[in-house]
Image: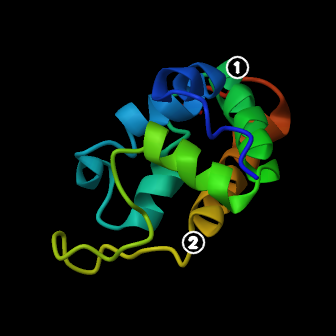
Amino acid sequence: MSTLLNCTDRDILDLFPRLADLGASSFGEDTDTFGDTLCEVIDDAPRGHRLPFKQQTVNELRTLLAYDDMDLDRVSWAVLSIDPTVDPEEPPNWGSFPSLRAFWSAVLHVFENDPAVQAGKDIDPSM
């Protein structure tokens, strides 16, 4: 049974503020401004964020992925402006994921493997 079934969208946004931030930017309605494919958008998602944001995002993603698929679906619809499981007509060759769990796992992988997160400190991008 869903543990988030009775939560409002506002409650979910409060539980997952970093994912909500990503939903308003990288994964928002104009995701194609962040890359030519959904995978490029995911790869670009950590860029421009400081270490605390990245670490908090990793924590939120781990929490999210611990929920069942019903809750995962509920949270995804609250924080995303896109459906990463469908292959849209525009832009062509955008790509899609077989499930929301696969999508969020890919996002977690990118954030966990970000050089700043790996080093545990912010890295100057000019270096």
Residue 2 rendering spot, x and y as whole percentages? 71, 48
Confirm whether residue 48 shows in the render. no
According to the image, label 1 marks what residue?
52
Q: Is residue 23 rendered to the left or right of residue 93?
A: right
Q: Circle 2 — which element?
A: loop
Image quadrant assignment for residue 7: top right
Q: Residue 27 location in percent, x, y? A: 39, 46
Quarter of image, res 38: bottom left
Q: Judge by depth and name the residue closer to the eye, 12 or 111.
A: 12
What colour scheme has been applied to the protein in the rendered image? Answer: rainbow
In the image, what residue occupies the spot 23% across and 46% down? 30
Mark 2 and mark 1: span between their CA atoms?
Answer: 28 Å
Q: Earlier in the sequence, mark 2 or mark 1?
A: 1
The residue carrying pointer 2 sits among few (fewer than 14), some (14 to 19) or many (20 or more) residues within 10 Å by Cα, namely: some
Q: Amino acid at mark 2?
A: Ser
**Up-down: is 12 above or below 114?**
above
Mark 1 surroundings within 10 Å by alpha-carbon count, few (fewer than 14), some (14 through 19), many (20 or more): some
Depth order, front residue of 68/88:
68
